[in-house]
Image (tube, rainbow, N blue to C red):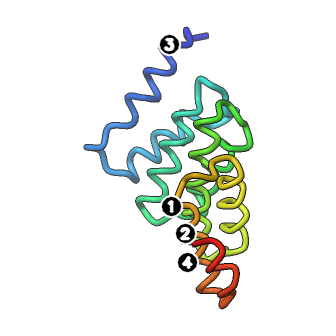
Amino acid sequence: GAAPGRAARKYAAMASFNEDPADRAAELERMLVGHVCTLETAFGFYTLGDCRYAIGDYKGAHEAWKTLHEANITNALTDQALFQDGRALDASGDLLAAIHAYNSFAARQPEEALVHFNLGEIYGRLGQFSDAAKAY
């Protein structure tokens, strides 16, 4: 197989922000088909989630970020994937799953203010104002 550095560079090269997100997502999907999330492919899964989110494919973004955070490759990648997954689930309307993802992130990164703000917003939309006040 390819040397680890070569594969990582290949996935990183896919992160060019000058490309159309739909084109980047399609290319990453081709590259990641049949691959599990490893240190080699983690950035590809993260970028695939970003691309899918950018084109409004929130379910697809959730699938990519869920794959990444369930693989638990590194703390930083897992944390970021949990937070981003909360965003995708919120955007898709699955508020209870978004709360779960955000709470999982908050348990790992309790000092991160934005996750508490996002939780407060979701609780507010659900009419759970006591929980919203605690989150903020």
Examine the image and state in which quarter residue 72 appears.
top right
Instruction: Identify which amino acid the numbered label 3 is placed on.
Output: Gly
Q: CA distance from mark 4 to mark 2?
A: 5 Å
Instruction: Identify which amino acid the numbered label 1 is placed on.
Output: Leu
Element at label 1: helix
Residue at 48%, 59% in the rendered image: 53
Is residue 116 depicted above or below 68 in this figure?
Answer: below
Residue at 53%, 69% in the rendered image: 117
Q: Closer to the observer: label 1 or label 3?
A: 1
Q: Are marks 4 and 2 in contact (CB under 8 Å)?
A: yes
Q: Which residue is mark 1?
A: 114
Instruction: Identify which amino acid the numbered label 4 is placed on.
Output: Glu
Instruction: Identify which amino acid the numbered label 2 is placed on.
Output: Asn
Q: CA distance from mark 3 to mark 2?
A: 36 Å
Tell which of 69 and 129 is nearer to you. Answer: 129
Q: Which residue is mark 4?
A: 121
Examine the image and state in which quarter residue 86 appears.
bottom right
In the rendered image, residue 1, in percent from the top left (x then y), is placed at 61, 10
Q: Which residue is mark 3?
A: 5
Q: CA distance from mark 1 to mark 3?
A: 34 Å
Q: Which residue is mark 2?
A: 118
Q: Earlier in the sequence, mark 1 or mark 4?
A: 1
